[in-house]
Amino acid sequence: PPDLVEACRRHDLPLLEVPEEVSFAAIAAAIAERVRAERALATDLLRALAEPADPGSLRAAVLACELPAAAAYVVLVAPGPAEALADLVQPLAAGAAVGELSAELAAAVVPRATGSPAGEQPAEWATALAAAVTTRARAGNARIAAGVGGPVPAASALPGALAEARYAQRAAQARTARPVVVSGAELASHVALLAAVPAPALAAFRGRLLDPLVEYDRTHQAGLVHTLTEFLDCNGSWSRCAEHLHVHVNTLRYRLSRVELLTGRDLDRFADRVDFFLALRSAPS
């Protein structure tokens, strides 16, 4: 049957002529058992990456998944189950190890194919893979929010790639568009930092700074949050911000004085500007 042929090809199993009395159900069961074994080995590898132990254990887990010890790698993290992630990744990257990272997340460890285009840098390959996963997800109507970590130059660096992929996945989860695959390379430093902060702590930080402004805007239609955002985007330039907002500089100064009064912060202080910047950037998309 065509689906059985496709399953054999995806899992690198030989196609052989078999006697008619051989049950295709038995062959399908053997393939399913092979897939279960591969998932279990990949899950063991992911656990070893999440809680790095000795290098020997990591090397053994990599070899058990039949991954090359010396290769460039990326790690892709997405909401589970592993089967859904495998359907997206394995047709694009033969040899990927896909397993369960946790009850909610699956991950794929993807080695760079030996047949990569000549001159292609690992970073270019990782970006192309992320784009291909996004395109395939869109074509299949999959609503994933995934993160990519790496590339890293060897299996020994995979724990770092996994950590980066998890941060990137949190950033992807905060975005409204689906599907979306966020690469760790595209995260600015403050974005990676915000993605690592637990959501309740981030919400509390954001609320302490911005809730008074949101409430004032709701009752007075003052546009304080928008004004503050523009001011910071203009790097604190009064004249440029006033021009962007099409208001007089004195109007801008009055609005920002209300921001200071409502929050108890001083926009002449760099530290307070940084706090406002992070609070605004942490707001859900």
Image (cartoon, rainbow, N blue to C red):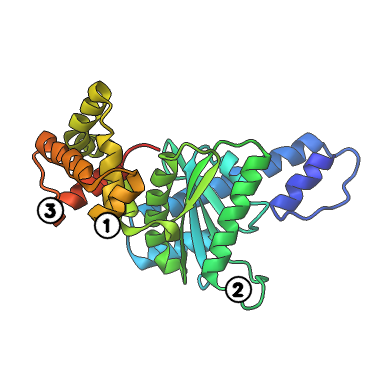
- In terms of sequence position, does the residue under pointer 1 or pointer 3 come before the other? 1
Q: Residue at x 64, y 71 (%)?
A: 114
Looking at the rendered image, the quarter that the N terminus falls into is: top right
Q: Quadrant of residue 279?
A: top left
List x then y, in percent, for residue 122.
54, 70
Residue 133 appears left or right of 217: right
Task: Tell me, for residue 120, which label it has, or none.
Answer: 2
Residue 65 appears left or right of 262: right
User: Visible in this render: residue 196?
Assistant: no
- In terms of sequence position, does the residue under pointer 3 or pointer 2 come before the other? 2
Q: Nearer the viewer, mark 2 or mark 1?
A: 1
Q: In the rendered view, tell whether residue 269 sits above or below residue 88.
A: below
- In terms of sequence position, does the residue under pointer 2 or pointer 1 come before the other? 2
Q: Name the amino acid type tagged 1.
A: Asn
Q: Residue at x 28, y 48 (%)?
A: 242
Q: In the rendered view, tell whether residue 61 sits above or below residue 78.
A: below
Q: Which element type, helix, strand or loop, lies under badge 2?
A: loop
Task: Tell me, for residue 235, which label it has, or none.
Answer: 1
Q: In the image shown, does 201 or 20 lie closer to the viewer?
A: 201
Query: Mark 1–mark 3 contact, CB under 8 Å?
Result: no
Task: Tell me, for residue 87, which label it has, or none.
Answer: none
Residue 259 appears left or right of 30: left
Q: Name the amino acid type tagged 3.
A: Asp
Q: Nearer the viewer, mark 3 or mark 2?
A: 3
Q: Residue at x 44, y 61 (%)?
A: 185
List x then y, in percent, for residue 41.
51, 51
Q: CA distance from mark 2 to mark 1?
A: 37 Å
List x then y, in percent, for residue 116.
65, 70
